[in-house]
Amino acid sequence: MGPDLSLSDKIKLAIVAVGTLAGAVLCFIGPPELREDVPYHRELGLGFGAFGVLIFLALFSLRAKAFLIFIVVTAITIGEAVVTMTFPFPSWQFIGLGVVTLLTACYAVFCLIDAVQGRDPSGVDG
């Protein structure tokens, strides 16, 4: 059974998927300046392509939607951890950001568990 998405959500996801796949095509066969300046343009294109396919599959599969949410939350968690560890915050801010990072990481783990079990981590089970 597919995810319970409204028509506007399906349109938004389709537009984002097409845009991401266009980014993949641009990385693969883009202008020569891009290919010269970015030596890893093929790997970048593969990443864009895989992400675009996952976004497109999220339109039809609950597991793909849950895995997409897991990837996004994991990226946010990594960003929070990098900011927490690299900037010289006062101790109370460091502790607060550490707690937020830990809670976000816990949610990422729960999203992965929901993806494996076929549940919707966004709380919109139909």
Image (cartoon, rainbow, N blue to C red):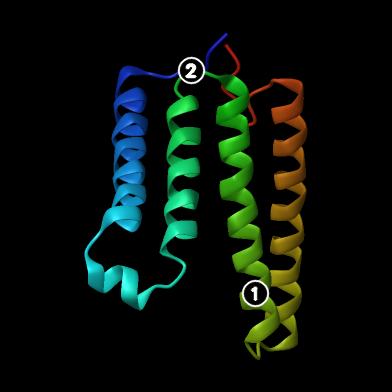
In the displayed structure image, the side of residue 94 where residue 49 appears, left or right: left
Q: Give the residue at mark 2.
A: 60
In the displayed structure image, the side of residue 101 where residue 16 appears, left or right: left
**Residue type at the position of mark 2:** Phe
Which quadrant, please, contains the N terminus?
top right
Q: Mark 2 touching mark 1, by CB under 8 A?
A: no
Placement of 109 over or under 94, stated as above or below: above
Comparing 68 with 50, the one in front is 50
Q: Give the residue at mark 1.
A: 82
Label 2 vs label 1, nearer the camera? 2
Task: Report how many numbered discs are placed on residues in the image.
Answer: 2
Identify which residue is drawn at 70% across, 46% down. Answer: 108
Comparing 41 with 57, the one in front is 41
Identify which residue is drawn at 48% across, 43% down. Answer: 51
The disc, 2 or 1, on the residue closer to the chain's N-terminal end is 2
**Residue type at the position of mark 1:** Val
Identify which residue is drawn at 34% across, 77% down. Answer: 37
